Amino acid sequence: MNNKGIDRDELFREILSAYLRSDIAAIEFEDRDHLDGDTIAAFVEGNLSEREARPVNSHLVDCSFCRHRSAELIRLDLEFAEESAKAPEAKPAPTKVSDVLSGILGKILGAGEGAVFAHQEDETKEEEDRKDDRGESE
Amino acid sequence: MPSDDPQLNNLIRECSDTIAEVYEACVASQPNFGVSSDSFTESVTDSVSKFLCSGQENPPSADEVREFVRSIRSDDLFLAIACAEGNERAWWEFDHQHRGYLERISRHLASTDLSAQEVIDLVYVELYGTRVVDGVRMSKFATYSGKGSIRGWLRTVIWHALVDLHRASHDEVSLDGMTENVGEGYTHSTFKNKDLGGEDQMIDHLAHEKYRKATLDSIRTSFSSLDDHEKLLLLYYHSEGLKLREIARLAESPGSPLRDWFQRRSAAREKDPSARIHESTIMRWLDKTYKLILERFCSELSGKHGLKQEEIDVCLELATRDLADPDIYRNLASNAG
Ligand SMILES: [Zn+2]
């Protein structure tokens, strides 16, 4: 507060906030120069070292598109972590991956392509048994 | 296939012992994934190139590469490489370990007009890859670097798949709204019209414009003078409307560079590097940054623009009043050329 009774800090924060929301500093990037999902995921998880994060940070400052994507993923990360804490993950119903993939790919590509995942029943069964023996589950 | 960059290839050769060590551990844990040492090395080389070389002023040292290789989620990367190569066992393992998680994330995100199952179907197809380039199937798994967890990566894949689905069904997509978008940054910067009395009338139009331009120029210069982590903190809070606890989450990982930067000179950090990041910590970082930028803003106005203290107050008051017009800064910036 100065001698005129103006709270400079508060006024300045409002102005700064409006300036930052007006986005005039943002730079337009070519599609290929944006951060990919893998980089944003590693950044959001806090898994980048200082050296690795430096160019990412600098891109996020200049590119409102990637910053916005990263902000949405930060929100999702927290929301989902909170939801998961309330309801721990259930064990998925046992499934055969070939059924899942053949079904999906069959729907999209036609029956022929789905057959790419027609696999040996025995092997999968054996794998399932091995896992059950070890008591592995999520 | 080695990279096109001979310097990178030399570095990778120099670190081949570390890569082999990590590879052997993966093979020991998943002997049936059928991933060759060459394809593992190729994938690691791509990750090193992406995170340690591109956008960097200096090439990494061999020690940095070794540290990087040890830091990657090798089991997740090994699984992703095997899935990209279409290994049946790996797909079984992936489905067994992660499908439940994918379903939960999809249910969490999918809106009423899109079923979670549709999203899962789309994601599986994308993960498998239907496009073939030069005889090679383009699996989404090939874009996973192992730098973050595979689940964090999957969240991003699902989120983007949903954006694509929305785009397909709504022409125009807003990235907002899939997660709650109104943060504290938006609410507590709400503009209140200040009563400036008759003072405003005494300032003629030209002086008005001069103060406005000086304010914009100074705010731009003082913001530019901040370090990137300080700018990003302000942008996340004010422009993206992230809440303090969301920023705290981002800074929570003990290795988070955001945390390192802000706490570099902090005694508390020295005492307890694993201390939790609370909302109050983020507020402190914000306060520190506000203080810094306000000082620079005022010294710009007084130094470069030769304004007296009273004039700086007029600038602030005028700018606060200008907030009623959300395009004021954009207009001023374009007028300034
Ligand atoms: Zn970008």
Image (cartoon, grey):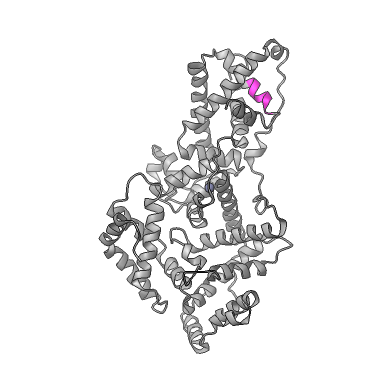
Residue B181 in the figure: left or right of residue B267 = right
Q: Residue at x 64, y 66 (%)?
A: B119
Tally of numbered discs: 0
Quarter of image, res B334: top right
Return the residue nearer the eye: B226 or A55: A55
Residue A92 percent location from the top left of the image: 59, 74
Q: Residue furthest front?
A: B134
B221 relative to A5, above or below: below
B221 relative to B28, above or below: above
Return the residue nearer the eye: A96 or B167: B167
| Residue B281 seen | no
Dominant secondary-structure state across the stretch colored magenta: helix
Q: Quadrant of the C terminus of chain B?
A: top right
Provide the residue span drawn in magenta.
Answer: B317-323
B69 relative to B265, above or below: below
Quarter of image, res B208: top right
Quarter of image, res B283: top right
| Residue A43 seen | yes
Residue B157 in the figure: left or right of residue B225 = right
Q: Residue furthest top?
A: B202
Residue B59 percent location from the top left of the image: 32, 49
Q: Residue furthest bottom?
A: A122
Is residue B321 covered in magenta?
yes
Q: Residue at x 53, y 48 (%)?
A: A30
Residue A39 percent location from the top left of the image: 48, 54
A116 relative to A69, above or below: below
Is residue B164 covered in magenta?
no
Q: Residue at x 62, y 68 (%)?
A: B122
Q: Quadrant of the N terminus of chain B?
A: bottom left
